Image (spheres, grey):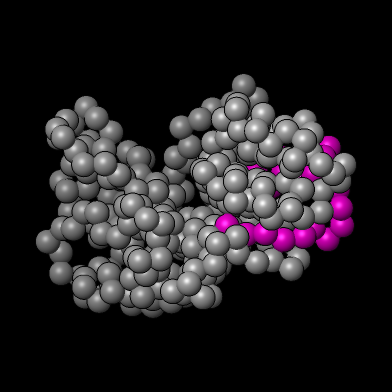
Amino acid sequence: MQYNLFIESLNNIFPLDSALDDDKVGLQIKTNKNSIDNVLIAYELNDEVVEEAKSKNVDLIVVFHPLIYRPLQTFDFQERVAHLSAQLIKNDISLYVIHTCFDNYKDGSNKILADKFELNNTEFILPDKKYPQNGFGIIGNLKSPKNISDFISKCEEIFMAPIRYNSKSKSETISKIAIIAGSGTSFISHVENLNVDAFITADVTYHNFHRVEGKMYLIDPGHYEMEQFIAKAIYDLLSKEISSANFHQSISYTNPVRYSNPNYTTLQIKNLVN
């Protein structure tokens, strides 16, 4: 497929202006190739993903997480971003970032998790005014109320990881929950006004757990853990929407975190390849 037409197709599916302010989305590395025939879909970039792209003769990698987020002051090959950028340039592989365009997408990051919890009566936490079918974050009701112990067990099952959470909420049971995949603690004040029993998000600090104690459960499964389903979802969508290119889903495990219980890592790797 002609290079520019492929990029235009991506932009039509995930409009760049649907991303959160100051996010770094779109084409981050462009090579001299005139066409896109083979595309690799990955959660984020590391050396294993680059090697996988090389082995599959990939022209472009579509990732969720941005590689280049802040301007590079020095192009130091010992530093991760410069090193990976150099590997892509050397091997004539372009890089395209979706990130919060997918978080905001109608069937994106948070809808995936809402489906896993089988939420009813869902609505977006922040509806997109320009793209009314889309929205950021999601809120909904469980099929039946759960106590905190049973709900945490459900979270462990879904996210395949240990769960951090605070000890007290205003309610003894959980019925209504809010979800923001990835780092969503900047939205705590907004979520507190939604009358939910629990808020699931990642990268929660100690003091934020204190902040909501007695108001709602704040549940942190981990950043990768909340977003580990995204690459497959993007692969499934683009394979359906763009028929003139060959898509491959990455099988490289990019989570830099390891656990004292190695079973969690094993479960996540099995989930990735299956």
**Residue 126 rendering spot, x and y as whole percentages:** 55, 62
Q: Going 44% across and 40% down the picture, which residue do you hit?
A: 254
Query: In the picture provided, is 16 more to the left or to the right than 235?
Result: left
Q: Nearer the viewer, residue 20 or 253?
A: 20
Q: Residue at x 87, y 57 (%)?
A: 144
Q: Quadrant of residue 137?
A: bottom right
Picture coordinates of residue 138 (x, y %)? 62, 59
| Viewer-proximal residue among 224 and 73 | 73
Q: Nearer the viewer, residue 74 or 209?
A: 209
Q: Residue furthest top?
A: 260
What residue appears at the point 77 percent right and 30 percent down from the top-left corner?
A: 167
Q: Nearer the viewer, residue 30 or 185?
A: 185
Magenta segment includes 172: no
Does residue 27 appear left or right of residue 127 in this picture? left
Q: Indicate yes or no whether the magenta region holds residue 144.
A: yes
The reply to whether residue 80 is in sight is yes
Q: Is residue 160 visible?
A: no
Query: Magenta span covers which residues?
Result: 137-162
